Amino acid sequence: MKKEILILAGPSAVGKSTVADLLTAGGHFALVRSATTRERRGDAHDGEYFYVGEEEFTRMLSAGAFVENSEISGYRYGTPRAEITRIREEGKCPLLILDQNGVRAFRESEYAPVTYAVYLYGDLNVMEERLYARELSGAPSVEALLRFAARKERNTEEYLTADGIPPLFDLLTPCDDAAACAERIRTAMKDGAEQSEEEKTNITKKLISEAEEKKNYHIN
C-alpha cells in the first residue's frame, strides 16, 4: 500500500525540524501542527503547534480528536485527526514530528497501513552542543538549565534503549547532513523502501555502544 503519512522521530537537537523544513519546502509535504497546552517560547518551533488551554485540550481528548497524545514536562500535546484530514484533502503528504510513543500510537491507529516512520540519529556530543547553544546562550534561566540537563540525559537514555527502535520504524538514517538526509527520506518513501532488520539492528547496536561510552565517561 502506498505510504501517505510521514513521521520523523529522534533525539532532541538531531535535526528533525531542519529536515522537516527541507521536505515541506518542496511542496509535497505539509507539517501537521500539534495541539499543546504549553506557552509560546518565541523560537523557531512555535509554528509547529497551535495553542489551547487545559479545558479545551481535555474536551478534544474526550471527543476522540487526537490520534495520539502525551504529557511532557507538565504540558500536554496531541495530534488532531482534523489536521491530517485537512492536509490529505489538499493533496499533500502529512508530515509529523513525534516521539516513539507517538509513532507507536500511529502504528496502532487506522493510519498504520499508510504511515512511513523514520528515525533520525546523530552524534550525542554534537546534539549536546546544539542543545547548549539553543538553551543556554546569553544569560540562561534556571528553567533553561534544567531543560538542557533533562534533554541531554533523555538523549543518552534513548540510545541506551535503542533496541526497541527497529520494530517501530521503516527507516533509520543518520542526520549529520540535513539536506542529504531529507533526500534519502524523500526517495525511500517514494519507493516504499523498507530497511532490513539486520541493518536496523546493527545501527541500534552502535547507538547503544555510543551511549554506554558516554555514560561511562561521565561516571569516571
Image (cartoon, helix red, strand yellow):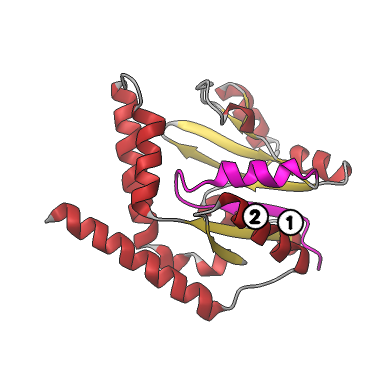
Q: Return the residue found at the far left.
A: 220
State yes or no: discs 2 and 1 in contact (Cβ < 8 Å).
Answer: yes
Which quadrant is the N terminus positioned in? Answer: bottom right
Out of 58 and 20, give the one closest to the viewer: 20
Q: Is residue 85 left or right of residue 68?
A: right
User: Residue at position x 28%, y 23% from top?
Assistant: 142
Note whether 104 is above or below 23 in the view shown. below
Note whether 107 is above or below 12 in the view shown. below
Q: Is residue 13 part of the magenta span, yes or no?
A: yes
Residue 132: where, in percent of width, then height? Answer: 35, 35
Few, some or many residues within 10 Å of mark 2 (<14, 14–19, 20+):
many
Out of 193 and 117, give the one closest to the viewer: 193
Q: Find the magenta span and give its range.
A: 1-27
Q: Quadrant of residue 169?
A: bottom right
Note whether 72 is above or below 195 in the view shown. above
> What is the CA distance from the residue labelled 2 to the residue labelled 1?
6 Å
What amino acid type is highlighted by mark number 1? Tyr
- The numbered dot on residue 111 is 1
User: Residue at position x 55%, y 24% from top?
Assistant: 54
- The numbered dot on residue 181 is none
Q: Is residue 169 part of the magenta span, yes or no?
A: no
Kindly identify which residue carries mark 2.
106
Residue 141: where, in percent of width, then height? Answer: 31, 20
